[in-house]
Image (cartoon, rainbow, N blue to C red):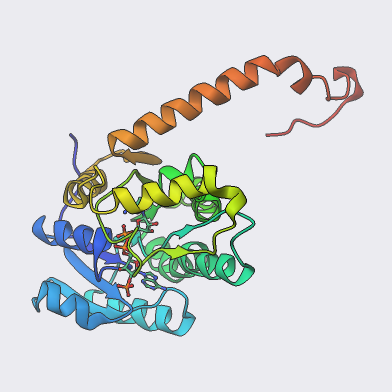
């Protein structure tokens, strides 16, 4: 694989545990410098100790003043940020009807608005240097939605849309954007300390209920290894031409293939009706995207 330079400065959100902690750790193992941020930075200090390479910083992605203080501290300490990993996030398990508005708003606050706020705070520093790499944690659920995960997936679909646009906006400014799409990885993501479970409406027992049971059964038996994921993220940051999307885990690759085949088949089956709604070519309509 072709590689770029080394000893970059990474800023990782949600580095207290799970995927964020593993990414921070893999970056440090690769000789990089890391601003390891967490709502409680003591957790980061406990995990990574103190060294010249790691700066533990408090950062709650739902709090604007905490974001600007954290980015300010990173710049003051290391001078710049090369790699931003927008990792902080959590899941919600429940049917669309079962999920109250305040839960929907809170998961969007973290997974979408938080990611946007951190990105807005870091980009000026990357633009100034015409260099950088933003990695946004999406999910298998950012590509394919399904029962019980509709609200969570809607946040990750938003991350995908934001990232696709951002990719094209900042590429001419020397900044790369990669969407990381993990399948099921063995972290605390499905444990009660992370995931929010909504009330249970009996009518959804055969759809949402089954996924609820599956989530309980699979927790701590997920096929994905967060350490291997973290090493893959380091590889992608080292790549000379990083991808827009990186699916991680065989389950994720399979889900994407299934969805692509379904979309292709459905588009072909309905092509005639789909293409019947334009004005006739002679009516001079402008070209759209
Ligand atoms: P964990 O539940 O193990 O860790 C979640 C992390 O996010 C914790 O560090 C937590 O901090 C942090 N966090 C949550 N809210 C905030 C906030 N407001 N500000 C700062 N940090 C916050 O989950 P994972 O490590 O598995 O998940 C990491 C990312 O990966 C998420 O975006 C998730 O959606 C995504 N993902 C995970 C998959 C999986 O199977 N594990 C699959 C697909 C995507 P604290 O310790 O303070 O709670």
Point 43% across, 32% down: residue: 256
Left or right: 136 in relation to 78: right
Q: Closest to the observer: 178 or 92? A: 92
In this rendering, does residue 176 appear at all? no
Residue 169 to residue 63: above or below: above
In-front residue for pair 196/203: 203
Q: Residue at horizontal 52%, vertical 48%?
A: 208
Point out the quarter of the image occupied by ligand 1.
bottom left
Q: Can residue 99 be spotted in the picture?
A: yes
Q: Quadrant of residue 76?
A: bottom left
Would residue 34 be found to the left or right of residue 117 on screen? left
Residue 240 location (% of width, % of height): 26, 40
At a point 56% along the width and 21% down the height, the residue shown is 264
Q: Position of residue 111 (x, y in %)?
A: 47, 62
Residue 215 lies, with reference to residue 107, above or below; the image says above
From the viewer's perspective, tell me whether residue 194 is left or right of residue 285: left
């Amino acid at each position: 694989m072709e590689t770029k330079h080394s000893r970059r400065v990474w800023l990782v959100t949600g580095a207290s545990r799970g995927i964020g902690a593993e990414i921070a750790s893999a970056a440090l193992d690769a000789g990089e410098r890391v601003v390891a941020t967490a709502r409680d930075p003591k957790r980061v200090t406990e995990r990574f100790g103190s060294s010249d390479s790691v700066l533990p910083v408090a950062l709650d992605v739902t709090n604007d003043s905490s974001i600007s203080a954290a980015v300010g501290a990173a710049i003051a300490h290391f001078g710049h940020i090369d790699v931003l990993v927008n990792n902080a996030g959590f899941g919600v398990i429940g049917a669309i009807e079962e999920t109250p508005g305040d839960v929907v708003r809170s998961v969007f606050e973290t997974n979408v608005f938080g990611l946007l706020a951190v990105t807005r705070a870091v980009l000026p520093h990357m633009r100034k240097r015409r260099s950088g790499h933003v990695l946004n944690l999406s999910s298998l659920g950012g590509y394919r939605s399904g029962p019980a995960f509709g609200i969570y997936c809607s946040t990750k679909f938003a991350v995908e849309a934001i990232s696709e646009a951002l990719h094209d906006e900042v590429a001419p400014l020397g900044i790369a954007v990669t969407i990381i799409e993990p399948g099921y990885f063995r972290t605390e993501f499905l444990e009660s300390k992370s995931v929010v479970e909504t009330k249970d409406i009996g009518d959804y027992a055969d759809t949402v209920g089954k996924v609820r049971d599956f989530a309980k059964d699979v927790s701590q038996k997920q096929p994905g290894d967060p350490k291997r994921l973290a090493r893959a993220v380091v590889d992608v940051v080292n790549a000379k031409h990083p991808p827009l999307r990186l699916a991680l885990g065989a389950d994720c690759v399979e889900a994407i293939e299934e969805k692509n085949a379904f979309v292709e088949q459905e588009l072909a089956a309905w092509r005639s009706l789909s293409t019947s709604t334009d004005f006739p070519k002679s009516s001079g309509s402008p070209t759209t995207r």
